[in-house]
Amino acid sequence: MGDVVLADMLRDKGLFPEAQGAAEVYFQILDESLRQASLSCIQQLRDRNISVEWPMTPGGGNKQFKAAKEAGARYTVTLQSDGSLEVKNLASRETSSMSLDAFAGVC
């Protein structure tokens, strides 16, 4: 059975999942040595009911920024080596540095 036929059948039975909204945050991982720490931050944000997407594989900043825009994210967040977060509001293009707790309060 093809995927389109299966999707149509699920829709007819009211079982097709609703589309998810855009992610609030796209967590960029620009320094692979910070991937584990970044994943910890991502989990903490998700524990606070903040929707987060991130790159599953290494990639450059431009590629990740494009992915953030395609995901409809409101913010990009990048963990810095000092443990702070660099947060960019994609609508206003303002960038600031803050703690995870402070950022969670903004979302």
Image (cartoon, helix red, strand yellow):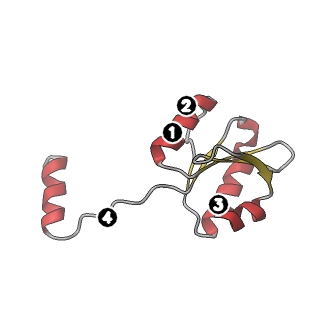
Mark 2 touches mark 1? (CB < 8 Å): yes
Image location of residue 17, percent across then percent down? 30, 64
The amino acid beneath tag 1 is: Ala
Is tag 4's residue or tag 1's residue first in the polypeptide sequence?
A: 4
Q: Amino acid at mark 2?
A: Lys
Q: Quadrant of the C terminus?
A: bottom right
Within 10 angstroms of label 1, few (less than 14), some, or many (20 or more) residues? Answer: some
Q: Quick one: SS at disc 2?
A: helix
Badge 3 element: helix
Location of residue 9 (image quadrant)? bottom left
Q: Which residue is mark 3?
A: 43
Label 3, residues with CA under 10 Å away: few <14, some 14-19, many ≥20: some
Which amino acid does the dot numbered 3 rest on?
Gln
User: Do tag 2 and tag 4 residues touch (Cβ < 8 Å)?
Assistant: no
Q: Earlier in the sequence, mark 2 or mark 4?
A: 4
> Percent position (x, y) of residue 7?
19, 56
Rendered residue at 42%/59% (across/down): 21
- Tell me the residue that label 1 is attached to: 67
How dense is the environment of label 2, judged by Cα within 10 Å: few (below 14), some, or many (20 and up)?
few
Q: Which residue is mark 4?
A: 18
Judging by the rendered image, the residue that carries numbered circle 2 is 63
- Tell me whether circle 3 and circle 2 mark residues in contact (CB < 8 Å): no
Determine the secondary structure under disc 1. Answer: helix
Can you give x and y, in whole percent of width and height, for residue 81 in the image?
83, 42
Q: Which dot, 4 or 3, sits closer to the camera?
A: 4
For image coordinates 73% across by 35% down, the residue present is 31
